[in-house]
Amino acid sequence: MKDIEPLTTLFEVPAGPPLQMPDEISRLYGPLYMPTHDGRPHVISDYVSTLDGVVSLGAPSFPGAGASHGSPGDLINGLNAADQMVLALVHAVADVVLIGDVGVRGNPHDVRRADAIYPPLAKAFQQARQGLGMPPQLPVAILSPEGGLDPAMPLFHVSGVRIAVITTESTAPGLLRRGFPKHVTLIPLPTRPDGLFSARAVLTAVQAFQPGRLILSDAGPRFMAHLIAEHCLDELFLTIAPQLAGRGETAHRPGLVQGKEFAPLDPRWAKLVSAKQAGHHLLLRYALN
């Protein structure tokens, strides 16, 4: 993994106080502003998208795909070090990360650590968490409505990582019998009449598991739709990769939001608060609420 040059800031509207970051991070990214709220956490999400709006290419099906690429997002960003650095940075400053079980099953070796996402800044990320008064390892909450998780997955065996599995009341007993490690907490939640979770209920459960000022949601395009529908998402970090992925007639290549329609009857607009450039990649930040 190669080192990067400092990002070029094209536009920035400071939102909230700047977080105290090690000099090495500040030199590459610039000031990192993060709003705070009374009585609730700030909720952000991070994605990388192709020019034509694809955020996932699905399971790699070409020879050598697994050997030449890391996470599914690396297939989108082309192993771009700047995008990896920003992704690692938001993980480093979050109090807790929320992920979906589909993502866990699709990439079971991803332990969601900033130092694993971008190793060249491993020490700086550790210093950042220490300076912010956070535990060394980022707590992880996994959204698993159907309970399709294997206790043998590497994520459940990383030393020092607290994990919560959020599932339905009917699925929780079966998960409990599978024998997850003691540091894994099962959180049963009721579902709505449509069989889905309320985004607010999920965030409340996450906050109860790990109180803090910043929740990073990486739970996939369908949960993203619920976050936006319930006005729960505060900001989106979005990298635009200079790639055209295309969509076949049968291929499932989702966009940023799946399962709900907003425009034109209930449009949701965002406000650009930051635009940075790294070569041909654009690293954008939008405020939604």
Image (cartoon, rainbow, N blue to C red):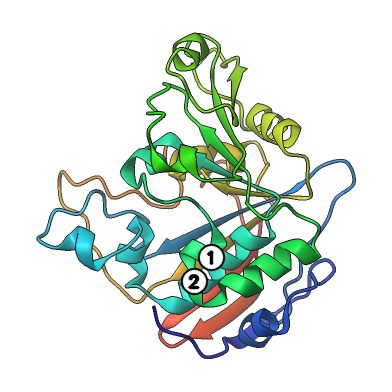
Q: Cβ–Cβ below 8 Å for labels 2 and 1?
A: yes
Residue 122 percent coordinates (x, y): 57, 71
Residue 191 percent coordinates (x, y): 56, 16
Cα distance, mark 2 to mark 1? 5 Å
Q: Locate the N terminus by quadrant.
A: bottom left
Q: Is residue 68 left or right of residue 227?
A: left
Residue 56, disc: none
Amino acid residing under circle 2 = Pro
Q: Quadrant of residue 258?
A: top left
Above or below: residue 183 compared with residue 115:
above
Residue at the (44%, 63%) spot, across then down: 48
Residue at the (66%, 66%) spot, across then down: 126
Q: Dot 2: within a 10 Å radius of its alpha carbon, few (fewer than 14), some, or many (20 or more) residues?
A: some
Q: Is residue 261 visible?
A: no
Q: Which residue is mark 2?
A: 119
Residue at the (16%, 52%) spot, across then down: 248
Judge by depth and name the residue closer to the eye, 133 or 71: 133
Q: Is residue 51 left or right of residue 250?
A: right
Residue 274 percent coordinates (x, y): 65, 75
Q: Which residue is mark 1?
A: 115
Amino acid residing under circle 1 = Asp
Judge by depth and name the residue closer to the eye, 172 or 239: 172
Judge by depth and name the residue closer to the eye, 25 or 45: 25
Judge by depth and name the residue closer to the eye, 270 or 80: 80
